């Protein structure tokens, strides 16, 4: 499985002839990505699905299947009505099969921010392929289900208006992954980012957990 971190929560995953892009938001740089077979988004917030930039991405990737969390799908259809026929909806706990890859949407609501911001829906993505089981949670840490057993690569949001490092560490410990990939880092300066990664690496599991920091490194085999 080859993974490229394109900024914030946006990952390009390549395996078995598939090129899958997750959460192309406005803190990410995905404009030059080509030959996509599938585009996914966990929810409608623009840092996860940028309605201004994604239409051009789809025009440049005419063979890409587009399957998004329902509200994100509606947002993109409204932004690009000429592409509406290509845009499908993820359904909770209904697996999507793409080549050798199985993707299971999990969860329900976005993490709580505060009382003055309405909660929206969020669907994390469990991706099974090439002997790996990867979980990209979007913006929630409370999804449940049998498909979440045996996660070996856990994508971990490390900073957000809704996030506490205590909850981040508890999330990693609850999943017991073999390794983690930091995501949701678009608001951080480098030194602050290192502090968050240190908490995860040192306390995410008893004895520590492996952190694959992919930021700025291009495609990396995991």
Image (cartoon, helix red, strand yellow):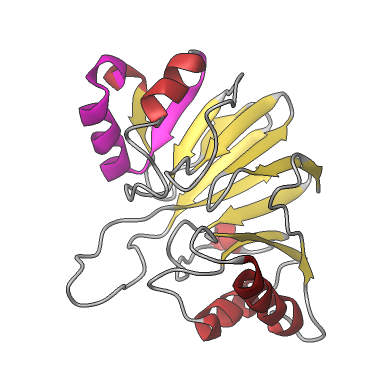
Whether residue 94 is visible here, answered yes or no, is yes
Whether residue 129 is visible here, answered yes or no, is no
Q: Residue at x 78, y 46 (%)?
A: 131
197 relative to 24, above or below: below
Q: Residue at x 58, y 25 (%)?
A: 32
Q: Residue 112: where, in percent of width, then height?
A: 32, 73
Q: Residue 86: where, in percent of width, then height?
A: 36, 19
Q: Quadrant of residue 192?
A: bottom right
Q: Quadrant of residue 20?
A: top right
Q: Residue at x 57, y 82 (%)?
A: 170
Q: Residue 36: where, in percent of width, then height?
A: 58, 23
Left or right: residue 178 compared with residue 5? right
Left or right: residue 54 compared with residue 97? left
Q: Residue at x 52, y 29 (%)?
A: 31
Please check the rendered image and state whether residue 75 is part of the magenta-colored stretch, yes or no. yes
Left or right: residue 106 compared with residue 157? left
122 relative to 68, above or below: below
Which segment did they paint magenta? 63-83
Please tell me how many numbered marks the rendered image carries. 0
Please check the rendered image and state whether residue 208 is part of the magenta-colored stretch, yes or no. no
Q: Quadrant of residue 193?
A: bottom right
Q: Nearer the viewer, residue 221 or 89?
A: 221
Q: Quadrant of the N terminus?
A: top right
Q: Main secondary structure of the magenta part?
A: helix
Q: Residue 152: where, in percent of width, then height?
A: 73, 60
Q: Nearer the viewer, residue 1 or 115?
A: 115
Q: Nearer the viewer, residue 98 or 77?
A: 77
């Amino acid at each position: 499985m080859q993974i490229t971190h394109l900024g914030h929560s946006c990952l390009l995953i390549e395996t078995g002839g598939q090129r899958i892009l997750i959460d192309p938001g406005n803190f990410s740089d995905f404009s030059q990505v080509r030959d996509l077979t599938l585009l996914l988004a966990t929810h409608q917030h623009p840092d996860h699905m940028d309605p201004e930039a994604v239409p051009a991405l789809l025009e440049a990737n005419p063979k890409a299947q587009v399957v998004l969390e329902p509200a994100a799908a509606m947002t993109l259809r409204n932004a690009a009505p000429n592409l509406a026929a290509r845009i499908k909806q993820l359904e909770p706990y209904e697996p999507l099969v793409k080549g050798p890859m199985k993707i299971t949407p999990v969860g329900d609501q976005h993490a709580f921010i505060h009382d003055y911001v309405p909660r929206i829906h969020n669907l994390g993505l469990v991706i099974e392929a090439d002997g790996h089981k990867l979980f990209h949670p979007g913006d929630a840490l409370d999804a449940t289900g049998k498909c979440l057993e045996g996660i070996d690569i856990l994508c971990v949001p490390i900073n957000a208006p809704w996030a506490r490092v205590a909850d981040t560490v508890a999330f990693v410990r609850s999943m017991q992954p073999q390794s983690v990939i930091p995501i949701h880092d678009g608001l951080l300066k480098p030194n602050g980012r290192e502090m968050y990664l240190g908490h995860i690496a040192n306390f995410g599991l008893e004895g520590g957990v492996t952190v694959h920091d992919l930021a700025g490194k291009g495609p990396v085999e995991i």
